[in-house]
């Protein structure tokens, strides 16, 4: 178990580094990510511009660092929102049961009936372009998973002897949910959230790539790939740099989620 706990340290450190870069992106960029210099347009990677420049002469490294703030923090905001909504809805449905349970779960089934990315594209297309609308579109399709996880664990825990003892001692439903049921839900929710960060990042980037997410000149990895796709043969670094950033970030959070699941499982 000790070895399992230690093995998560490098992965959690990598995830924390990615998040810190996203939070402090404005202070880490070597150049202004929005400053255009046509004299340096489409320069390949060099000593001054480590990842090269785009068609407007903007430093790609600076734009990728700034883009992490848009892409990563956007994904984390979606994860936080859907996990909170899912826990509230799922725990309420599992704890109360009856008609409320049926109503909330059937509502979740409606969203789960559609392919996730197709539904997100539809909602984002209806709402119009923009990162907020893209995040809302992804959140609408993501919350039922968390609601089902919370409901299943609530159903498992609510009839345990210590819950009955809490009722007998005079604890109300809110206290029971807060002190006895919620702590049992958080572990699986954290694991699911960690594993979902990469998925949400790819979905937000995908919507931006299609032109219905973050809009130019906003530094966002999917939008940067979309703007540079016509130059893949002549200036491949314009596409490969943000693509590699997505790959690395998704891999970091997926590996972190896997190790977090192993650590939590080893406690059971």
Image: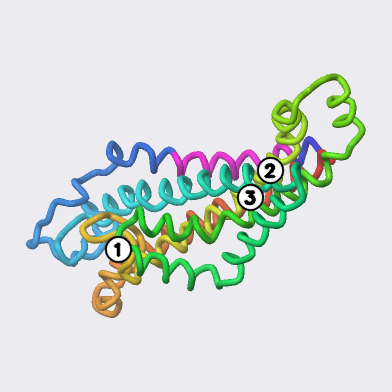
Q: Quadrant of the C terminus?
A: top right
Q: Mark 2 touching mark 1, by CB under 8 A?
A: no
Residue that protrudes farthest toward the right in the picture: 161
Does the stretch in magenta take in 12?
A: yes
Q: Is residue 15 left or right of residue 179?
A: left
- The x and y percentages for residue 172 are 75, 26
Helix, strand, or loop for circle 2? helix
Q: Quadrant of the N terminus?
A: top right
- The x and y percentages for residue 104 are 65, 54
**Which span is picked out in magenta?**
5-19
Helix, strand, or loop for circle 3? helix
On the image, which quarter does residue 234 sit in? bottom left
* Residue at the spot 70% in from the left edge and 37% down from the top edge: 6
* Residue at the spot 48% in from the left edge and 46% down from the top edge: 76
Q: Which mark identifies residue 129?
A: 1
Q: Where does label 3 land, which residue?
A: 257
């Amino acid at each position: 178990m000790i070895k399992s706990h230690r093995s998560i340290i490098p992965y959690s450190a990598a995830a924390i580094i990615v998040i810190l870069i996203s939070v402090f992106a404005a202070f880490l960029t070597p150049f202004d990510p929005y400053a255009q210099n046509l004299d340096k347009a489409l320069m390949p990677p060099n000593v001054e511009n480590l990842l090269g420049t785009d068609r407007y002469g903007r430093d790609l490294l600076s734009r990728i660092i700034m883009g992490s703030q848009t892409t990563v923090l956007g994904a984390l905001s979606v994860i936080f929102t859907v996990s909170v909504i899912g826990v509230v809805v799922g725990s309420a449905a599992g704890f109360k049961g009856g008609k409320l349970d049926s109503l909330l779960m059937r509502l979740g089934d409606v969203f789960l009936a559609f392919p996730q990315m197709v539904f997100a594209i539809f909602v984002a297309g209806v709402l119009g372009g923009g990162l907020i609308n893209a995040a809302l579109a992804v959140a609408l399709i993501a919350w039922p998973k968390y609601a089902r996880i919370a409901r299943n664990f609530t159903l498992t825990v609510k009839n345990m002897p210590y819950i009955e003892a809490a009722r007998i001692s005079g604890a109300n439903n809110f206290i029971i949910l807060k002190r006895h049921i919620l702590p049992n839900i958080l572990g699986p929710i954290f694991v699911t959230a960690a594993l979902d960060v990469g998925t949400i990042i790819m979905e937000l980037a995908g919507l931006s790539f299609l032109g219905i997410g973050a809009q130019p000149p906003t530094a966002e990895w999917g939008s940067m790939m979309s703007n540079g796709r016509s130059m893949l043969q002549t200036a491949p670094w314009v596409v490969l740099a943000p693509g590699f950033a997505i790959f690395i970030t998704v891999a970091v959070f997926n590996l972190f989620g896997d190790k977090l699941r192993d650590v939590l499982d080893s406690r059971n």
